């Protein structure tokens, strides 16, 4: 089983400026297509390309346990559970294996920063495109 780890590095002044610019372009792509919540620590490629941060509890490792039998959210019963949607999409794309990875606790210092910049500067891991073999 894989457990993700993190290196903590503060953003410099120039990185903060660059992050604002890159976040603008990131929003152009990720908000309409994925409903990105700007967590700055993107795990879209591990979650079937459904943003896990749409969950009202911001859970990054599977559903909370309050999901109804029909797959509805405990907090907003009119919505489907984000993790229900993630599993369904991951199954469709053949990416269920990536859901077994344990994601680290969210680093709130990265909130509202550019995930693209955070990949380039080595703060977070790059997206995983290939599903690992058995
Ligand atoms: S950066 Fe975070 S909030 Fe945005 S799509 Fe990726 S996981 Fe979701």
Image (cartoon, rainbow, N blue to C red):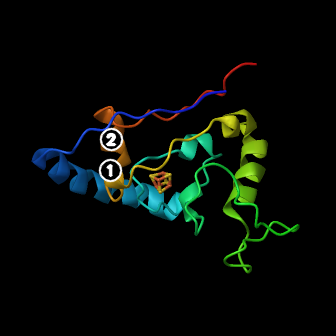
As drawn, the residue found furthest toward the left would be 13
Q: What percent of the width, then of the height, locates residue 67? A: 78, 66
Residue 102 image offset from top left, x and y in percent: 61, 38
Going 73% across and 80% down the picture, which residue do you hit?
78
SS state under label 1: loop
Characterize the local packing of mark 1: few (<14), some (14-19) or many (20 or more) Cα atoms within 10 angstroms.
many
The extreme top residue here reads 134
Q: Is mark 2 within 8 Å of ligand 1?
A: no
Element assignment for label 2:
helix
Left of 36 or right of it: where is 46? right
Taking 49 as reference, is 2 above or below it? above
Q: Which mark is residue 106?
A: none
Seen at 11% across and 49% down, the residue is: 13
Dividing the picture into quadrants, the one containing residue 57 is bottom right
* Residue 54: x %, y % from top left: 56, 64
**Is 15 rendered above or below residue 29?**
above
Work out which quarter of the rendered image holds the C terminus and state it: top right
Q: Is residue 78 above or below residue 54?
A: below
- Is residue 51 visible in the rendered image? The answer is no
Residue 100 appears in view: yes
The foreground one among 125 and 7 is 7
Residue at which label 1 appears: 114
Mark 1 in CB contact with mark 2 (< 8 angstroms): yes
What distance separates the C-alpha of mark 1 from that of mark 2? 6 Å
Other residues around mark 2 within 10 Å, as few (<14) / some (14–19) / many (≥20):
many
Report the label total: 2
Q: Which mark is residue 118?
A: 2
Q: Residue at x 66, y 28 (%)?
A: 131
Which of the image's four quarters has the N terminus?
top right
Q: Tell me: is circle 1 under 8 Å from ligand 1.
A: no
The answer to whether 57 appears left or right of 66 in the picture is: left
Q: Position of residue 83 (x, y in %)?
A: 70, 57
């Amino acid at each position: 089983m894989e457990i993700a780890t993190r290196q903590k590095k503060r953003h410099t002044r120039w990185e903060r400026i660059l992050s604002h610019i890159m976040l603008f372009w990131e929003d152009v792509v990720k908000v309409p297509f994925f409903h990105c919540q700007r967590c700055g620590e993107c795990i879209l490629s591990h979650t079937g390309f459904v943003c896990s941060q749409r969950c009202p509890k911001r859970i990054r490792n599977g559903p909370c346990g309050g999901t109804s039998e029909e797959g509805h959210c405990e907090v907003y019963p009119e919505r489907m559970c984000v993790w229900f949607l993630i599993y369904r999409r991951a199954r469709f794309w053949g990416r269920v294996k990536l859901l077994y990875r344990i994601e680290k606790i969210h680093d709130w210092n990265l909130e509202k920063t550019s995930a693209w910049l955070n990949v380039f500067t080595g703060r977070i891991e790059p997206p995983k495109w290939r599903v690992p073999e058995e």
